Image: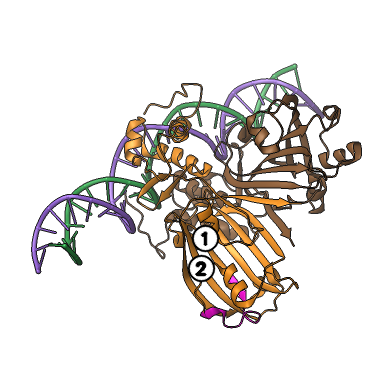
Chain colours: A orange, B brown, C green, D purple
Amino acid sequence: MQQQAFAEGTLPLYLRVRDQLAGQIDKGVLTPNTRLPSERILAEQFGTTRVTTRLALAQLEAEGKIYRSNRRGWFVSPPRLIYKPTHDYSFSDNVAAQGRVPETETLDVTATEANAWLATKTGLAVGDPVIWLRRRRQIDGRPVLVENIYLNATRLPGIETYDFNRSLWKLLREQYGVELKGKRIEMYPTALVDPQASAIGVTAGTAGLYVTRCSQDGQGGFIEFDEEFWLHDALSIQVEVS
Amino acid sequence: MQQQAFAEGTLPLYLRVRDQLAGQIDKGVLTPNTRLPSERILAEQFGTTRVTTRLALAQLEAEGKIYRSNRRGWFVSPPRLIYKPTHDYSFSDNVAAQGRVPETETLDVTATEANAWLATKTGLAVGDPVIWLRRRRQIDGRPVLVENIYLNATRLPGIETYDFNRSLWKLLREQYGVELKGKRIEMYPTALVDPQASAIGVTAGTAGLYVTRCSQDGQGGFIEFDEEFWLHDALSIQVEVS
DNA sequence: TCGCTCATCTGGTATAGACCAGTTTGACGA
DNA sequence: TCGTCAAACTGGTCTATACCAGATGAGCGA
């Protein structure tokens, strides 16, 4: 069982494979959403095994250059969506403005009550009525996030009867005259685990970005708390302050 | 070569190993910065191989629950630092305020000129003089970020002569009377690659968060452009707007 | 033409073992 | 007592192979 010689400038083999593939992506030989050759074929091409090839692929995935679709293959990542969480705008409008095709699916709508965790996040009391909304959102047919939205049911009576497959922000403004003002946003990178991972259709452990957003109206009253689980390679966040 | 039976509720073995370790961390059996048993010992304890054990460890690493120190072992991650990039404050003060011990090292100070990339980011013209500063910052002895800072040399004459192992923000205020006002922040998750990975002392491919921050003074003049490479498990970002 | 079935392709999970290259530690000698 | 140095230990990289399970598409039958 011969061993790697660490030839060619001491770079490990899996990083040399990575560099080859990254070069093809950067040079445009492989374009966004193209499928890469299968792991077995790549392994043969590079004269190595699937295990090492997968190391290289995992590296590129961590960098956000490629993504995987469960048991279908590896694909070149499209550009990141520019996302400004401090703005009030519609996901759909934002995606469309960047030349992409958005899609929103409502997974679940449930009337429930605030638990301790939600209470500390929102300022509600434990037991206050909330509407819990779960949605999945896609860009160009690829699911990029799932979200849990908790709406102040007292402040927004009857909201559970509306169609949620559209902009929530517009719904609040048009039906309730609510303009979201204050926001408290928190985010950090983490891995997606079930149930979010399977809702997006990725394996548990895929890198993600966890974003929460607590919005109030002009008077400081709590309106909605949004908890988003993004694929890590799907977005670039921008914030401007003056 | 017998195969896994997918027993015990169909969870794959590496996720069951993950759950066991995660449980010990959540219950406080393993406390922050404690070293885990070695991969070989864990593999033996769980009746599996190193490869599978490493899968479980990589999963926990992706979730930000553990981190590795090169060839020294795996350690339990401490709590994330709360970081408000829209605020003007000192890294050192912020870390200390959260009961941790900060440290800053200046790696490099170079007088150079704005290239095309920096020009588009800052509004400078290509060729304008800038001071390029590289720093590494630690929390409780663990390097958590490296940064490239580009300072407007025209606006801040002689700044390269100061000590940079302290708060840059205070330096600007005290020596130049500059209050940073406008900020444009951009960030996205990605993997750390060299030279940043080796500067922090992690292997290439470790998950990170890339943050850039462009700051101006009250009159909209460009002051500094900051490019930060964070370990992904080291921080939680908070932004508030009204 | 349309729907279904099944072979085939894909990645997902797992075993067993090997050598490489820094880190740590403990025994030993000055 | 203290420094040195080698052994032992750690993760890092790699080979070779196997079976599992979901996705896909070709082909067949209604």
Q: Which residue is mark 1?
A: A92
Q: Which residue is mark 2?
A: A166
Q: Are marks 2 and 1 in contact (CB under 8 Å)?
A: yes
Residue in the image at 47% along x and 21% along y: A8
A126 magenta-colored:
no
Horizontal relation, residue B235 to residue B158: left or right: left
Q: Position of residue B78 (x, y in %)?
A: 68, 52
Examine the rendering and report whether any part of residue A181 can be seen.
Answer: yes
Output the chain of dot 2.
Answer: A
* Gap between marks 2 and 1 measured at Cα: 8 Å
Q: Position of residue B24 (x, y in %)?
A: 59, 59
Q: Position of residue A143 (x, y in %)?
A: 46, 57
Label 2 residue SS: loop
- In this view, B97 is above or below A165: above
Amino acid type, callout 2: Arg
Q: Position of residue B137 (x, y in %)?
A: 74, 39
